Image: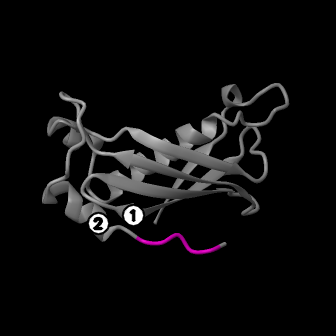
Amino acid sequence: MHIASVNVRFYETDMMGIAHHSNHFRWFELARIEFLRKIGVTLWDMMNEDIVFPIMNVSCNYKEPANFDDELHIETYLVKMTRAQMIFRYRMRRASDGALLATGETKNAFMSKSTGKIVRLDDTFYQPMLAAVEEMPNE
């Protein structure tokens, strides 16, 4: 598990002063990239090997709004890993009171950047990612 932190910026809010729902997907991406970097897998390393990992499915369940300048903590779990895909789950909380603001999930496939075809990871990337797999505990 990795916890990423981000503050809601003014431009990420709507006219009601609430973080626009589309930002949650950006914050999930930020958390996912930080998670991978923490376990020694970077997007640049993968791209240098002609591997990218586009989103195949994404979901977000909104519980409470995030507001301008709230500090958010995004708990990030790699819950499933195969050589062809990975699934992350997220739990977003407001740092000041621990309130659960949102939960989400992303499913990525590994793809050759040059051909656009699904590829299977070799052990260089697969083993550190597999070692990081864990279930997200129940709330």
135 in the magenta segment? yes
Find disc 2 in the rendering and name its residue: 130
Classify mark 2: helix, strand or loop: helix
Return the residue nearer the eye: 34 or 64. Answer: 64
Our reading of the magenta stretch's main secondary structure is loop
Return the residue nearer the eye: 51 or 111. Answer: 111
Q: Residue at x 52, y 58 (%)?
A: 89
Q: Amino acid at mark 1?
A: Lys
Asked if the residues shown at circle 1 and circle 2 are in contact, with their CB atoms under 8 angstroms apart, the answer is: no
Left or right of 110 in this view: 71: right
- Structural distance between the alpha carbons of marks 1 and 2: 8 Å
Q: Residue at x 68, y 51 (%)?
A: 61
Q: Position of residue 120 (x, y in %)?
A: 20, 51
Residue that extends furthest to the right in the rendered view of this protein: 16
Residue that extends furthest to the front in the rendered view of this protein: 117
**Quarter of image, res 131:** bottom left
Find disc 1 in the rendering and name its residue: 80
Left or right of 20 in this view: 83: left
Quadrant containing the C terminus is bottom right
For label 1, count other residues whose C-alpha is less than 10 Å away and answer few (under 14), some (14-19) or many (20+).
some
Query: Which residues, given as a range, are shown in magenta?
Result: 134-138
Classify mark 1: helix, strand or loop: strand
